[in-house]
Each structure stands twice: as structure tokens, then as C-alpha cells.
Image (spheres, rainbow, N blue to C red):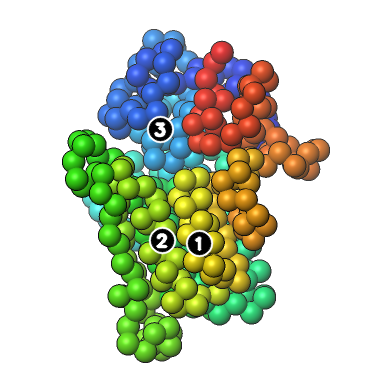
Amino acid sequence: GTKVGLMFFMKDATVFQAGSSTAYDANPTNAQLTVLGKEAVNTNNVNVLLSNYGSGYTPYVAKAGEDLGRVILGPGAAAESVYVCPATCTNEAECQSAAFGCTMASSRRFKYLFGSFSPAGYYFRNFVSLSVMKRAKTVAFFSEHTKSFTAAMRDGARTTAEDLGLKVVADIGIKYVTCLDTTSETCTKPTKNQLTDLIPAGGIQKILDDGKPIEHNLETYLGAGYKDLADPFAELAKALDVDVVIGATYYDSCVALVKAFSELKFYPKSLAVAACVGNPNLYDAVGKDLRWLSGPTQWVNSLSGPDYIETALLNVKHYIKDSSSDDPSPLQFYNAFVAK
């Protein structure tokens, strides 16, 4: 079970960090991860390697284990795409092109990789089901679509919504781009994004009649911030008077989304967001609007006892006993696995 696995690898595994054996590198290259993973195995002659990364980087550490026949533990990876090959590829070449390590559709991607999180595609399923029970009719999605974890949450939620008859009226992907030249006008001038222009003549009824939701991707730069992504989405949701909003977000994009709705004074019947609801800093960020939110969390401190052993084991403080930090952000989560 999960408990046994976590107790085992925290005691006996070697912690792998990109860059060196002593310094944490939050932004390694993909190739660096695989090379250093092999180096960690060969240098220390370990049987189990712990990858303290999320869904985006874990496959590259897993490749090291696959090549050397070593068990890789990826406790920070929740996206199904890390563990399972795409269902849509039709031959070995196509599968390998879609996701390295894959040879067959819907097969296990890495023989030696094991995780501990529940699959990200399940995170919003109960919320969607409850929304349907409460007679919601329409839903709009706001997601960081280029990141495997948030994309997996969005994909699972949309599939569930469509299966249960909830009408998808908008699906907006967002991307936050880091500028190389932070003095350029592109980086410092706010991005002008407009989504309401995409509403067809006839409005939401036209979307429902045609079964064609508004699907669009927005992009902004380091100097602009998530506000330039969240504000136009909130304006679109208000114009469509959507019942339910699902934000497949990380913390900063979550806060921007909640603030955007609050500033517009538009509150959908329900709003679910991810990677922020369990963060104790969220109340300081959004104030009383916190009472309006729902969403999944793997880090909540309020659950205790044997029925919630996985919640306790996934909490940062379970590993860093002397930590004064209450922030369950990804960086804190990854740092929890660094040997002290």
C-alpha cells in the first residue's frame, strides 16, 4: 500500500536532485534529468531512486530507471500520462512519437515507475457529479493546458461533464511565458486579451444548439501576470452566465481567477479550483471569497487519524519535522523529499 511504500523509500532510497547531489534545481533540462538519474544509480549503486518532481519532469527520471532496470518512485507525479500511454496512437512509431517509452496504446508507459498520488483526472469528478445533481446545466473550463498535471485535471473533468450531460460552453487554455528580455515592451506591457468577441451571434443558446463550445488559448508574459489571463475569462463566463466554472490551476492562476470574478461581482453557482484550496495562505489572498470555493487538495491539515493516513503522508511536515512552513506548494512538496 501507499503507507508501506512511502515508509520504505524515505528510509532506503537515494534522493535524486537535478544539478548536483546537494543543490535543488527547480528548472532542470529534460536531458539532464535522465543523465543525472543514471549517474545517481551508477555512482551509489542504488536499487530504488526517488524523483522529487511533478508530472512534467518525472518521465525523464523514469527513463533512467527504465534503461538501468531500477525502481523509480515518483510521489509528486499525478497526471495519468506519466504512467499510461495515449489511447489514440495506432502503432509503435506513433506511440513513441506521442510519448517516449510507449509502444502500445493504453499500455503501461514505464515498467519500473511507481507513484503515490491519486490520478489527476479524478480530482474534479465528484464536483462535476454534485453540480449535475444540483441541476447545473453549463460549465466553462480555465486551465493551464500546457502542463501535464493541470491538463490531466481538465481532461478528466471535461470527460465526466460530457458523460453526465453537463454542457461545455467554453474551454480556455492559458500559458504563462517567461521572457528572456524582461526590459522589452512585450514583457512589461500588459497583454490585451479579449474573449467576449468569440461569442457567436445568438449567444449561449447558439453554442448549446450547435454543440460547439468556445475553445481558445491565451498567452501572457512574465511582466503581465495571470490577471491578464483570468480577467478576460471571467468576462466571458459572465457574458455567458455560465453555471459552473472549473479551474485546473496552480496557486497563482487560482488566485487570479477568484479575484477576477470578485472584481466583476459575478459569482457562478459553483467554482472549483485546484492546487490552492488546501493552502493556508489562500484566505489572505482572496479573503471572504474563500467561502465560495471548492476543489481538491492533497495537502489539507484538517483531516487526521488512520482513515486519512495518505493525507498525512503527503503533507510536507510529515517529512520536515522542524519546518515552520505551512505552504503546501509544489516547491515545498518537492523539498520535503530532500535528505537533510
Question: What's under tag 2, amino acid-wise?
Answer: Asp
Residue name at image x 56 percent, y 25 percent: 336
Residues at discs 1 and 2 in contact (Cβ within 8 Å): yes
Q: Residues within 10 Å of mark 1 (few under 14, many from 20)?
A: few
Residue at numbered disc 2: 231
State left or right for residue 201 relative to residue 330: left
Single out the residue that lies furthest toward the right. 305
Question: What's under tag 3, amino acid-wise?
Answer: Ala
Q: CA–CA distance between discs 1 and 3?
A: 44 Å
Position of the C terminus, as image quadrant, is top right
Residue at numbered disc 1: 263
Q: CA–CA distance between discs 2 and 3?
A: 38 Å
Q: How many marks?
A: 3
Q: Is residue 96 visible?
A: no
Residue name at image x 33 percent, y 51 percent: 175
Residues at discs 1 and 3 in contact (Cβ within 8 Å): no
Position of the N terminus, as image quadrant, is top right
Q: Which mark is residue 188?
A: none
Residue 258: give x, y in percent of width and height: 53, 57
Question: What's under tag 1, amino acid-wise?
Answer: Glu
Which is more foreground, mark 2 or mark 3?
2
Which is more foreground, mark 1 or mark 2?
1
Q: CA–CA distance between discs 1 and 2?
A: 9 Å
Quarter of the image for residue 174 reads: bottom left
State left or right for residue 267 relative to residue 91: right
Residue at numbered disc 3: 62
Q: Secondary structure at mark 3?
A: helix
Which is more foreground, mark 1 or mark 3?
1
State which tag comes first along the sequence, 1 or 3: 3
Residue name at image x 54 percent, y 30 percent: 332
